Image: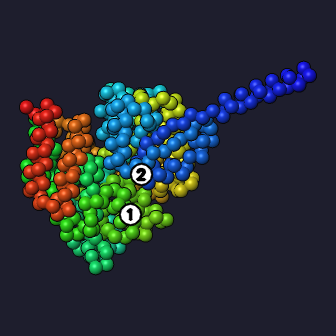
Amino acid sequence: MTMTIRALLGACALGALATAAAAETTITVATVNNGDMVRMQGLMDDFYAKHPDIKVEWVTLEENILRQRVTQDIATNGGQFDVMTIGNYEVPIWAQRDWLVPLNDLPADYDADDLLPAMRSALSVDGTLYAVPFYGESAMVMYRKDLAEKAGVSIPDQPTWSQIKDAAAKMTDKDNGIYGICLRGKPGWGENMAFISAMANSYGGRWFDMNWEPEFDSEPWKATLTDYLDLMTKYGPPGASSNGFNENLSLFQQGKCGMWIDATVAAGFVTDPEESTVADKVGYAVFPNKEGVDNHGNWLWSWNLAIPESSAHKDAAKAFVEWATSKEYTQIVADKQGWRAAPPGTRTSLYENPDYLAAAPFAQLTIDTISKATPEKPSVQDVPYVGAQFVSIPEFQGIGTAVGQIFSAALAGQMGADQALQSAQALTEREMKKAGYVK
């Protein structure tokens, strides 16, 4: 009898231990519906094998919606998300408000010193790292070599906008569903305004002068928007005012675009033979500049993983962030899907890896453009801000989106370039005065 009771007690104790061992911490990760993020969700077995006590729930959103959701959550201390996918625009602003968990205690084998200096600098405030990059990018021209040859045009390694316009005209074949150029038109500060702002830099423009007065009434901006609308109206696909990164990626993969000027991260997808019908026909060139303006846009962006202070599961969140941005995860992607698919633009070691360099013909141009980007001096003119596709002030999220809606409406034919610029100037002047930048 005594032995039976002891046996039962022992069984109960073992059961309790088993229950404790099986206890799970569930973390919620908010992320963007871009290809690299979606790919990671299919490669979670390794993480779960290493962390059987952590379960990850995903909230995957279109980028404009993602920005609204995570901004609202973190600003209200909502605690809905344990890990947020945010850009290098948000990181310094949110860190200065003490909204993000510092990440300076990453383990030695994470090798934070391997992070590309440009990315690490953009994600740090006063030397403290507040987010880690999942992938990083600049921007470049991706073009169809076969269509260029058929049209009798040559895309130089460093084309000017006049050369791009000439090539777009000659490569367009609307009767066969081929459009000479695809560019972002979907409204949003991170959609059409990311591209148009970089384009304005390459025309010698800037968002603000040194007194924070907006410059949409300047000649560089007039030339930028006029040429952008002209390119897209004559040689772009129909419905372009609804096309963002993902929509243009799909068009290019289907063989509908002669050229696509966008983020360098796209190169890994347009050359994927399982997803792209033109995988073996893609050439690359530097982001264009206007003749006589020594500026190629200075696009520098990264999608990063950060932990909000409102998270109730910071340790589990940190374990996930370390794994998802580690060299180990890069190796998992390479083993499963090839080196071409490795998340680009974050680590020095990737660009020293001969296997990656052999598999990714776009790798050298990607690292060159990232290394040469100067978001602290995005324009040939002096500016009072940091950022090439954005302006690093809290008010930009609202202003940039509103201006993006105006320019997208112009692309949809609802107004001309002059009216769009006048509206953008008036709107931005009003908001900057309201915010106290301009008296």
Query: Where does label 1 land, which residue?
Result: 250
Q: Position of residue 200 (x, y in %)?
A: 18, 51
- 214 to 25, vertically: above or below: below
- In the image, farthest residue toward the front: 1
The residue nearer to you, when weighing 351 against 432, is 432
Q: Amino acid at mark 1?
A: Ser
- Residue 100: name its quadrant: top left
Q: In the current view of this chain or complex, which residue is farthest to the bottom?
A: 175
Residue 327 seen by the camera: no
Q: Are marks 2 and 1 in contact (CB under 8 Å)?
A: no
Q: Residue at x 28, y 70 (%)?
A: 179
Question: Residue at position x 11%, y 40% from top?
Answer: 430
Tell me residue 139's x, y (percent).
Answer: 31, 53
Give the label, 2 or 1, closer to the camera. Answer: 2
Quadrant including the N terminus: top right
Q: Residue at x 11, y 35 (%)?
A: 433
Q: Position of residue 422 (x, y in %)?
A: 8, 51
* Label at residue 130: none
Task: List the residue tagged with mark 2.
Answer: 33
- Identify the residue at horizontal 21%, vertical 72% (top origin): 169
**Vertical order, 19 against 161 (above or below):** above
As rendered, which of 285 and 129 lies closer to the eye?
Answer: 129
Between the residue at mark 2 and the residue at mark 1, the CA separation in whole angstroms equals 13 Å
Place of residue 232 in the rendered image (x, y in percent of width and height, measured from the top left): 22, 65
Q: Nearer the viewer, residue 417 or 210?
A: 417
Question: Label 2 is placed on what type of residue?
Answer: Asn
Tell me which corner region of the image, top left, top right, bottom left or bottom right, holds residue 392.
top left
Task: Pick the residue in front: 420 or 375.
Answer: 420
